[in-house]
């Protein structure tokens, strides 16, 4: 416990003097409000809570669902090893209370190295952008609304705080819809051509139509359908009081958002099962060229491991273990400037 208290003090002094950093999937904004015997104790407990919340958020966004619980069970002394920095955005305190908005940054290399050592699979691939089309009807028989002011379901998504991590869920903008001549009727018809156009024009991995309407006194029903899914729309019932529409819409938003995130993660888990090993040869002018290429390759989430076979005479031979769909693997490598030429039993790497 002494180690943890000393670390909290050091971090607090550091964060007071530190500046801002670039937004990343390993940085989390946390709001804390803690009351205790005095302000110092309240602040210490707030920092402890913020670090745990930030760590669990990063775990949830980057680790496959089946492995999250073991990471959540870490002690405070274990958890502090993953904290890189804490920044105070704003804070207030009284004699016994501490309120603050904090930014906590998890140490990405330490986090990834730990997962590799424990053989805990990560989510793979670049951040997924998911576009949602929130269609609303008071009752199922009513005319569907999309861009009308009465669409409180769309408003809930538009007012949603910006998500962090590998899944970025955003509502379709009216500007994009107008450009593509897209409306509520096309959404409810699940017009594949129109949805595909949305995906292409917004650079989205998938497009979800979320058809919401009140179901008597039971609450809100939401029919969830995606462009990539070959299944019929999934019906979700969110219980709640219709008299408090704002609260019910917020509850529905978080429920549906969690469902979409789980669907994306499950698809990602299936990609994790697709593994292959490539024999690769790379010709370099200077050894520093290979060092740079090796670092770049390791930064690709689809590349699980590099195993050096031979190095010398301006040539390196290595095995590269990759995870995921072949098109996604090659696409990620090409985006970083890599080109692979296939020969009989090996690939020649050009960069």
Image: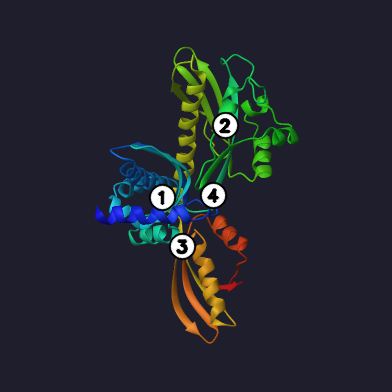
State if disc 3 and disc 2 touch (CB < 8 Å): no
Residue at 57 percent across and 16 percent down: it is: 138
For label 2, the SS is loop
Q: Which numbered disc, 4 or 1, marks the residue that appears first in the sequence?
A: 1
Q: Which mark is residue 333?
A: none
Q: Residues under labels 4 and 1: Cα distance?
A: 13 Å
Closer to the eye: label 1 or 3: 1
Q: Which residue position holds label 1?
A: 63
> Is residue 17 visible in this depiction of the protein?
yes
What x and y, as percent, mark residue 292? 55, 73
Callout 1 crowding tier (Cα within 10 Å): few <14, some 14–19, many ≥20: some
What x and y, as percent, mark residue 177? 70, 33
Residue at 40 percent across and 57 percent down: it is: 111
Of residues 113 and 78, which is closer to you in this image? 78
Closer to the eye: label 1 or 2: 2
Residue at 47 percent across and 55 percent down: it is: 17
Considering every residue shown, the one lying at the far left of the view is 1
Considering every residue shown, the one lying at the far bottom of the view is 313
For label 1, the SS is loop
Q: Is residue 296 above or below residue 233?
A: below
Q: Which residue position holds label 4?
A: 127
């Amino acid at each position: 416990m002494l180690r943890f208290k000393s670390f909290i003090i050091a971090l607090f002094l550091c964060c007071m003097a530190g500046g801002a950093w670039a937004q990343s999937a390993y940085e989390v904004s946390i709001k804390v409000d803690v009351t205790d015997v005095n302000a110092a104790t309240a602040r210490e407990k707030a920092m402890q809570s913020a670090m745990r919340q930030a760590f669990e958020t990063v775990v949830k966004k980057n680790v496959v669902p089946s492995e999250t619980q073991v990471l959540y069970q870490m002690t405070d002394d274990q958890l502090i090893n993953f904290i890189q920095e804490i920044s105070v955005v704003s804070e207030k305190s009284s004699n016994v209370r501490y309120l603050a908005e904090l930014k906590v940054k998890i140490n990405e290399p330490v986090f990834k190295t730990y997962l590799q050592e424990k053989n805990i699979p990560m989510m793979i691939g670049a951040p997924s952008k998911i576009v949602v089309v929130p269609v609303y009807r008071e009752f199922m028989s009513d005319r569907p609304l999309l861009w009308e002011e009465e669409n409180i379901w769309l408003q809930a998504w538009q007012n949603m705080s910006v998500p962090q991590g590998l899944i970025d869920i955003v509502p379709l903008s009216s500007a994009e819809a107008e450009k593509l001549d897209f409306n509520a009727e096309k959404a409810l018809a699940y017009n594949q051509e129109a949805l595909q156009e949305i995906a292409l024009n917004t650079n989205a991995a998938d497009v979800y139509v979320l058809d919401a309407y009140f179901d008597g006194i039971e609450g809100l029903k939401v029919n969830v359908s995606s462009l990539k899914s070959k299944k019929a729309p999934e019906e979700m019932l969110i219980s709640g009081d219709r008299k408090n529409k704002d609260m019910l819409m917020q509850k529905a938003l978080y429920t549906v958002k969690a469902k979409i995130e789980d669907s994306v993660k499950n698809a990602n888990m299936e990609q994790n099962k697709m593994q292959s090993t490539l024999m690769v040869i790379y010709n370099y002018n200077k050894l520093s060229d290979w060092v740079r290429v090796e670092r770049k390759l390791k930064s690709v989430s689809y590349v699980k491991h590099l195993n050096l076979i031979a190095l010398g005479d301006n040539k390196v031979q290595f095995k590269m273990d990759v995870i995921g769909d072949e098109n996604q693997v090659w696409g990620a490598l090409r985006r970083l400037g890599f080109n692979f030429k296939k020969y009989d039993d090996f690939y020649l790497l050009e960069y």
